[in-house]
Amino acid sequence: MVTYIFSGKVEPERASVSISPLSIRIEAIDAGFSGGAIVSINSSQVSIKLDTTSEGVSLATMKNYVEQFVRATVDSYGYLSGRGYDVEITSAIQPDGTQTVFGVGIPELEESRHERPLSFQELLEAVGKSPYLHQALADLREAIRSPLDTGFFCYRAVECLRQHFKKDEDGDQDGPSWERLRQNLRIDLSWLNRMKDAAKEPRHGKFPYISGTDSVEVMQHAWRVVDRFCVYASKDFQALPESDFDILREV
């Protein structure tokens, strides 16, 4: 048995939350992780003592599941009180005493930030042209902040952009707007299906385990689609030229 200590906070901190220590059981069979935890929340400061016999599980995976269970506790409190809160786990002390402070980004995405096609000012101008892009960026934020829902939020970001391509004559049919998105942004169906597959079960209330590698891959797919829509919006919604943009497709 080894012990980890996780720390975090309930946000917004100005609306103080205190909950008496609770004992919970974490079972994440698909991730090969289980353990018993004591959760304490005092003045919106969160402390979790986790005892586990699981071996070979990454600290990031543990953090994601701990955060999920603490969030469920705070969501229950919020439901009863009619308030909206969020939870952020900010650091952990491992069994050997090493402290890790968790960042707010995805390393693979941070490393590729030079690939973003617009400057910050250009992006703000593009967002001003499209409420759908604004909502898509919000979904990308949630894809990072809610690791167990990454697939859901990545695909919803793309679905938001698809709304731009709808026309009155489409009626209730979604197919034509998806086709316009693919043509204007030069994206193959296989690229979109990678995200759609990751979103399918979460959209229906199921939460299958998704590995860190798969999660990053889905986010990279979503970021590339949003990249292209950003250019499309910045060019006053002109179709991306074949000479500058190869078709995005699964290899």
Image: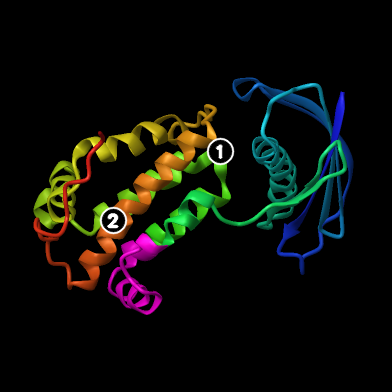
Q: Dot 1 lies on which element?
A: helix
Front residue (pair 180, 228) = 228
Determine the CA span between mark 2 and mark 1: 22 Å
Position of residue 130 in the picture relative to residue 84 (left or right): left
**120, above or below 142, in the image:** below
Residue 141 at x, y percent in the picture: 50, 56
Circle 1 packing at 10 Å, graded few (<14), some (14-19), many (20+), is many
Q: What stretch is highlighted in magenta?
A: 114-134
- Picture residue at 75% right of the left edge, 56% below the top: 10
Q: Quadrant of residue 96?
A: top right
Q: Residue at 9% across / 58% down in the picture?
A: 243
Residue type pointed to by label 2: Leu
- 49 displayed left or right of 115: right
What residue lies at 42% left-to-right and 56% top-to-bottom?
Answer: 112
Check disc 2 and report the residue beneath it: 161
- Residue 138 lies left or right of residue 250; in this view the side is right
Whether residue 166 is in magenta: the answer is no
Label 1 sits on residue: 148
> The residue under label 1 is which amino acid type?
Leu
Q: Which mark is residue 6?
A: none
Task: Kindly indicate the quadrant of the structure image that contains residue 139.
Answer: bottom left
